[in-house]
Amino acid sequence: MLTFGLFGTGHWAAEVHAAALAGHPGARLGGVWGRDPAKAAALAERYGVPAFSDPDALIGAVDAVAVALPPDVQADLAVRAATAGRHLLLDKPLALSLPDADRVVEAAGRSGVASVVFFTNRFRPAIASFLASAAATGGWHGARGVTYASIFQPGNPYGGSAWRRAHGALWDVGPHALSLVLPVLGPVTRVAAMAGPRQSVHLTLAHGDAATSTLSLALDAPPASTTVELLFHGEEGIDVLPRREGTPVDALRLAVGQLCTEVDTGTRDQQCDVRFGRDVVAVLAAAQTAREQGRTVTLPAGTSVTG
């Protein structure tokens, strides 16, 4: 039984992370820490666990950490937890800069802890099977994806997120899109990006010399235009991503199970670990530079984990 400390008190922490951990047969929730002590106390009471006032005290009391905090806060906590030998269940994006992502990877590698970055759709069984089949088929010339969300509508639990407002669709839904494309088309070597209406962003990615992909991303799309679409095209024709099924809690329970298995067996799966999370951050950082400077950015060698 793996004991987790939960870091975060917002909607995602309370309704997804805490719920998934509380209902998992191989895990238990051991405590909560948050930047707002009152919210941490309320969430801890809801799940019958202690609230911690010191994050390092919670790290010291558990086997693993589950982080549901803004990416810049997450990166520092992940380094502290990994350095203390605690396994990592993290959210996307891993960090908001490549140096911070590299620090997490270095700390996890040095301590040998297991890690899973929760790219939600990678833990939906139908989508995972689709991606495995598409990767095995090969021969793809490219992909075309659209991820349009509309989080700034009244009542949306993520509309007040300061980091999402500051960093936009590229850093929020961009990781989801990349987590689906990279396992099939391989590492990104060049990135171009352009801003669009309603603060959308549109990427063109080169995957070596064999394939290209285009991704359109938005957080403030008109409500009638929200969608998640992805198709691959190539020698075998066209293959379309299946519809999302199940809840985020269902998906996170599978991610928790994967982490527990890695800890129990001593194995380390690269599909959604911090190294893959780091490579996603590398693409996002390159895309941000491409958009800001109006040029194509070549990614440095070493960005090669594809999931």
Image (spheres, rainbow, N blue to C red):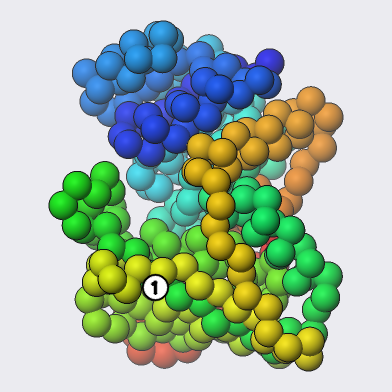
Q: Is residue 287 above or below residue 39?
A: below
Q: Which residue is mark 1?
A: 217
Q: Is residue 97 above or below residue 109?
A: below
Q: Is residue 122 above or below residue 304?
A: above
- Report the side of 145 relative to 187 (left or right): left
Residue 243: image x %, image y %?
A: 56, 62
**Front-most of 189 and 221?**
221
- Report the side of 198 relative to 266 (left or right): left
Residue 104: image x %, image y %?
A: 55, 44
Query: Measuring 61% from the left and 24% from the top, which residue is drawn there?
Result: 24
Query: Measuring 47% from the left and 27% from the top, which residue is drawn there?
Result: 19
Query: Measuring 74% from the left and 58% from the top, which residue is drawn there?
Result: 129
Local SS, label 1 = strand
**Quadrant housing residue 150:** bottom left
Q: Residue furthest left?
A: 154
The disc labelled 1 sits on which kind of residue?
A: Leu
- Report the side of 21 relative to 268 (left or right): left
